Image: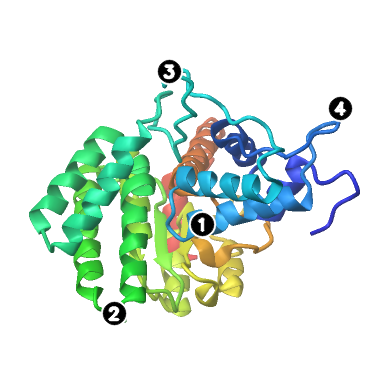
Amino acid sequence: MAGNRYGMTTGAVARHLGVSPTTVRSWEQRYGLRPAAREEGRHRRWTAEDVSMLEELCRLTASGVSPAEAARTVLANRDTATGGASGPARPSDPSAGGGRTAVPAGTRRPGSRHDPPLGPVRAECRGLGRAAVRLDGPAMDDLLERVFQEYGLVVAWEEVIAPALHAVGKKWESTQERYVEVEHLLSWHVSTALRRMIVAGSAARSTAPPVLLACTPTEIHTLPLEALAAGLAERALPVLVLGGAIPAEALDAAVRRCGPAVVALWSQARATADRPLAAHVAGTAFGPRGARTAPMVLLAGAGWAGEPREAGMLRPGGLGEALDAVSGRYERLRSLRSDRAQTPGGPGFTVLRRSARTG
């Protein structure tokens, strides 16, 4: 890690981690993950130890641990390493009362300033895991429906579903595959619930270019893509899901045929990440001459950790950030379409899509 004797700026840390500076600041505000020391009169600087703490946070969340739980873990590790004598005070929750510590949340409900209480979410995570171990399908369905309705997709995924899947997966690995039926059943019920949301939230036929979701050629885990698809459908954005282990040639053909605004490539482990493929997709241009465009590529999943940021590519820090990035892309495209509509002969979304099929 490069840096001077004063440490790294927030912007430099964000570039190092492959996230936005806003994300790093949100970690400070929500979880108290700020530098252990700050020089008087200087802007905030992150030491190598501080950056290692954030790297651990990214590793834990990428493996399925909720952001709130991961933050508590890394802060506890730092307190242990320093004997609890250093580090800023953690933010308090004004709604908690009685001097309790803050209730951190990985994400907030869209449009809401109020985080859900962490205790019930963690209890439901445990309940989902216990229902899976009992092979109790109806209980899993009821619980999934309840957390989606009460907390929304992003919180339900990051605070309940992903940690439950991670816990069941660890149980399977530690018991010589005795719980493989539990993991498969839980995955099936989660997938069913997510697909119901996709169908319920799917928009009518749109002339806007779609969001194309696919796993890299050697990646078979599709549940995170289904969660992203459900969130996009909830926002009335057109989605095409290609699923797991998509050959590079098939992905290239799909991109050229449908002219997507965004392509999300999921890689769960570094061994399945395919940087040349991502760069190829980001550089694939389509549309009429004079108005050619290329898709924005989302590098989603832990497999892309540590990859440098390049033009046309974005590595979101979680489901909520990915949804916001895609929504922002469509807002910019709508603005561009409006500007072109005011220019005689200016192409809009419909022209872009039709040209993509022939280009």
Looking at the image, which residue sits at the far left? 138
The residue that appears at 37% across and 45% down in the rendered structure is 159
Earlier in the chain: of badge 3 and badge 2, it is 3
Earlier in the chain: of badge 2 and badge 4, it is 4
Q: Counting other residues with Cα less than 10 Å from the Cα at mark 4, is it few (<14), some (14-19), or many (20 or more)?
A: few
Q: Amino acid at mark 4?
A: Glu
Q: Amino acid at mark 1?
A: Leu
Secondary structure under tag 1 reads: helix
Closer to us: 213 or 184: 184
Counting from the top left corner in percent of width and height, residue 239 is at 34, 53
Mark 1 to mark 2 CA distance (whole Å): 23 Å
Counting from the top left corner in percent of width and height, residue 178 is at 24, 78
Which quarter of the image is occupied by the N terminus? bottom right
Earlier in the chain: of badge 1 and badge 3, it is 1
Q: Specify whether residue 137 is in view.
A: yes
Earlier in the chain: of badge 3 and badge 4, it is 4
Disc 4 target residue? 40
Q: Amino acid at mark 2?
A: Glu
Q: Are marks 1 and 3 in contact (CB under 8 Å)?
A: no
Counting every numbered tag in the picture gives: 4
